[in-house]
Amino acid sequence: MGIFKKSLLFGVGLLTLTREKAEKVVHDMVDRGEVGAEEAKTFVNELMEKGEQEKAAVQETIKKEVEDLRKKFGLITRADLEALEERIRALESKLNDEK
């Protein structure tokens, strides 16, 4: 893989790159002679795969950061709240049954 292709894989803004945009970029590269027609399809697939990998990495980083902030500020999750609501309902029901 040439240096140009490696650079492009890194710098194209892969997080928002759609297949249509990738195909257009690669088609333009074919027209300019930078990529052979036989390489074009493989290159589009490489771009899309790299984009999905980058997207997953960014999502994981964001998820971790949000979780760290939640813990730092002592915030509860929706699941925590729902569990507490269920416990309150159960206690209320128990109290009402005892009356």
Image: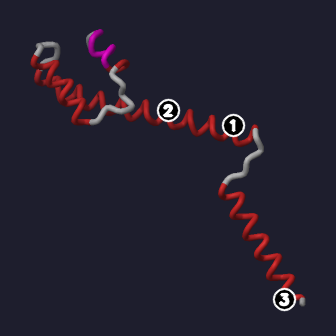
- Asked whether, in this view, residue 75 is left or right of residue 99, the answer is left
- Mark 2 residue type: Val
Residue drawn where x is 56% and y is 35% of the image: 62
Residue assigned mark 2: 58
Quadrant showing the N terminus = top left
- Mark 3 residue type: Asp
Residue 96 x, y percent position in the rendering? 84, 86
Residue 20 x, y percent position in the rendering? 22, 35
Magenta stretch in the rendered image: 3-8
Residue 39 x, y percent position in the rendering? 17, 23
Residue assigned mark 1: 68
Tell me how far mark 3 sits from mark 1, CA to CA.
Answer: 42 Å
Q: Specify few, some or many for label 3: CA neighbours under 10 Å numbering under 14, 14-19, or 20 or more.
A: few
41 w.r.t. 92: above or below: above
Residue 64 sits in quarter? top right
Q: Secondary structure at mark 2?
A: helix
